[in-house]
Image (cartoon, coloured by chain):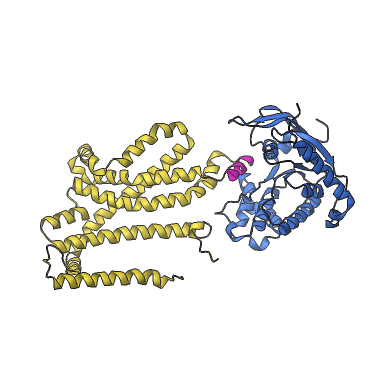
């Protein structure tokens, strides 16, 4: 079956519209209280009226997410390069990277907030979101660096390429598809990390979307809570789409995953 | 080592770290401008010989000596069994790679790259990516890349084994034409008796693991060799000689 761009966009939109219409209708027919489940129309009203407040919170959460994502990419790529070139360092440090990955962020958040100080909550959020996001980058990049074509390695060796040239001209482009896959996962995890960390650690004087959700819940202001949730989802989808666009741009001419084939 | 020898392998052993003895007492001299084919069963160490000549590994015992003060040692083109192209780079960038690694600036590298692409019939595809090419075209890119530095020695490891019969014949003719044009020394690894006899000055038969030379058959026929050579009685006789030597090599190592 052929799936054109209109189907790619139209089908999920149609499903969403049906779902929202059913939600609106059921809530009205069954007279569900707003503090239990607000209708979509009330959420939209809240989104519009509370937008300045929510936009500030969104900006705060996105700033933490972007910073953590960038740091996770730098840290993950850097560690992967070191691990790929030194088995000894990998043996020494990899277990600790795994420990950080498997330890729930909610469990270490209180420690991090104590270490950074309660006055520096954004720093704690940034560290926690980075910890959540960096492992997929490390793991994917390491796999990419280890998957370099052996024949091409031999070719570079045959022509006496220096170590830096092998890295820049061979290892980095070879690992790029893996890295981009890891970055797509890390982008979502950075946002999740930023939100979960704020739930646990708070956000100091600034207020992110997580805190806005907690606050709205405490006030039984469900329309605003749903509006904040909606913004979070939109932000997550936007991050994913941006990274997918980057992946497409960098791989579209040559990588199997981005090439459209006709049999 | 004789004055004519470009490179000589003397009593070379190669044992890999996992314990496999790939070569044992392998001795072979390769003369300048010679087209030598190594023929032998799978796993007999033919590719190992090429890799040792290329310096992609060291012999466990024995010596590899180069004539001419070792200058030719750094002047090698290698065509692998697979095209081994960088998928993220265009055809022209793939061919340009050895020049780039040698530090030659882009402007100076352009004429030889264009020249080689023309010689292998890919000048219209310089901006294509490897995935957009057929198997035969990719192998042409690989040959062009190996020759772009005008090396004195060309090492070829079953380069056409994965191609269909027609494409293989085409590429063999093209390779021989290029060799006539500029006679580098060629060491060519193949499974095909027919291919080796058609292309070479000399066919070296390598015994099953551990690899060693068991026969050398000189193909005393003039170049250029037209496809009609394949239909002659002499060609059939050479093929029979090589096949007999191969069969004998299967009987295993001497006691």
* Residue shown at the point (78%, 55%) measured from the top left: B173
Q: Residue B116 vs residue A160: left or right?
A: right
Is residue B157 placed above or below B13 in the rendered structure? below
Predominant secondary structure, magenta span: helix
In depth, the one of B103 and A194 nearer the eye is A194
Magenta range: A150-158
Quadrant position of the C terminus of chain A in the picture: bottom right
The x and y percentages for residue B140 are 68, 55
In depth, the one of B217 and B75 nearer the eye is B217
The x and y percentages for residue A159 are 63, 42
Q: Residue A70 vs residue B146: left or right?
A: left
Is residue A27 placed above or below A253 in the rendered structure? below
Q: Which chain is blue?
A: B
Q: Residue B36 vs residue A81: left or right?
A: right
The x and y percentages for residue A200 are 20, 46
Q: Is residue A99 magenta?
A: no
Q: Which chain is yellow?
A: A
Spot the residue most to the front.
B251
The x and y percentages for residue B21 are 65, 30
Q: Is residue B183 visible?
A: yes
Q: Is residue B127 visible?
A: no
Q: How many marks?
A: 0
Q: Is residue A152 magenta?
A: yes
């Amino acid at each position: 079956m052929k799936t054109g761009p209109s189907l790619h966009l139209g089908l999920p939109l149609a499903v969403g519209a049906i779902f929202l219409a059913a939600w609106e209708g059921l809530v009205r027919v069954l007279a569900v209280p707003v503090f239990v489940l607000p209708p979509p129309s009330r959420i939209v009203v809240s989104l519009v009226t509370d937008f300045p407040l929510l936009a500030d919170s969104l900006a705060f959460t996105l700033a933490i997410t972007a910073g953590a994502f960038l740091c996770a990419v730098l840290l993950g790529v850097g560690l992967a390069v070191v691990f790929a070139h030194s088995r000894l360092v990998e043996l020494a440090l990899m277990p600790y990277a795994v420990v950080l990955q498997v330890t729930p962020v909610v469990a270490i958040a209180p420690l991090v907030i104590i270490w950074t100080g309660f006055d520096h909550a954004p720093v704690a959020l940034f560290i926690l979101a980075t910890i959540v996001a960096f492992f997929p980058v490390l793991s994917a990049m390491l796999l990419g660096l280890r998957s370099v074509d052996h024949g091409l390695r031999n070719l570079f060796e045959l022509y006496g390429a220096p170590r830096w040239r092998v890295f820049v001209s061979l290892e980095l482009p070879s690992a790029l598809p893996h890295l981009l896959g890891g970055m797509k996962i890390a982008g979502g995890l950075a946002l999740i990390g930023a939100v979960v960390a704020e739930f646990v650690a708070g956000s100091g004087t600034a207020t992110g979307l997580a805190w806005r959700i907690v606050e709205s819940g405490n006030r039984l202001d469900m329309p605003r809570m749903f509006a904040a949730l909606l913004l979070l989802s939109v932000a997550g989808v936007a991050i994913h789409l941006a990274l997918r666009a980057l992946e497409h741009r960098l791989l579209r001419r040559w990588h199997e995953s981005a090439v459209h084939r006709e049999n | 080592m004789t004055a004519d020898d470009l490179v000589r392998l003397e009593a070379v052993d190669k044992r890999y770290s996992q314990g496999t003895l790939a070569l044992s007492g392998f001795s072979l001299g390769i003369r300048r401008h010679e087209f030598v084919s190594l023929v032998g069963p799978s796993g007999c160490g033919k590719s190992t010989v090429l890799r040792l000549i290329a310096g992609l590994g060291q012999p466990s015992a024995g010596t590899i000596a180069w004539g001419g003060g070792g200058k030719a040692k750094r002047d090698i083109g290698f065509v692998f069994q697979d095209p081994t192209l960088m998928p993220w780079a265009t055809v022209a960038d793939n061919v340009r790679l050895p020049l780039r690694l040698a530090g030659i600036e882009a402007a100076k590298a352009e004429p030889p790259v264009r020249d080689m692409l023309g010689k292998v019939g890919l000048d219209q595809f310089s901006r294509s990516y490897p995935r957009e090419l057929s198997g035969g075209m990719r192998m042409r890119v690989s040959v062009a890349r190996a020759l772009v530095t005008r090396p004195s020695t060309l090492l070829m490891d079953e380069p056409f084994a994965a191609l269909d019969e027609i494409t293989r014949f085409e590429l063999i003719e093209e390779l021989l034409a290029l060799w006539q044009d500029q006679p580098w020394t060629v060491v060519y690894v193949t499974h095909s008796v027919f291919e080796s006899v058609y292309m070479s000055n000399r066919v070296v038969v390598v015994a099953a693991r551990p690899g060693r030379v068991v026969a050398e058959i000189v193909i005393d026929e003039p170049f250029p060799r037209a496809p009609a050579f394949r239909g002659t009685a002499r060609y059939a006789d050479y093929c029979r000689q090589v096949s007999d030597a191969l069969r004998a090599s299967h009987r295993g190592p001497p006691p």
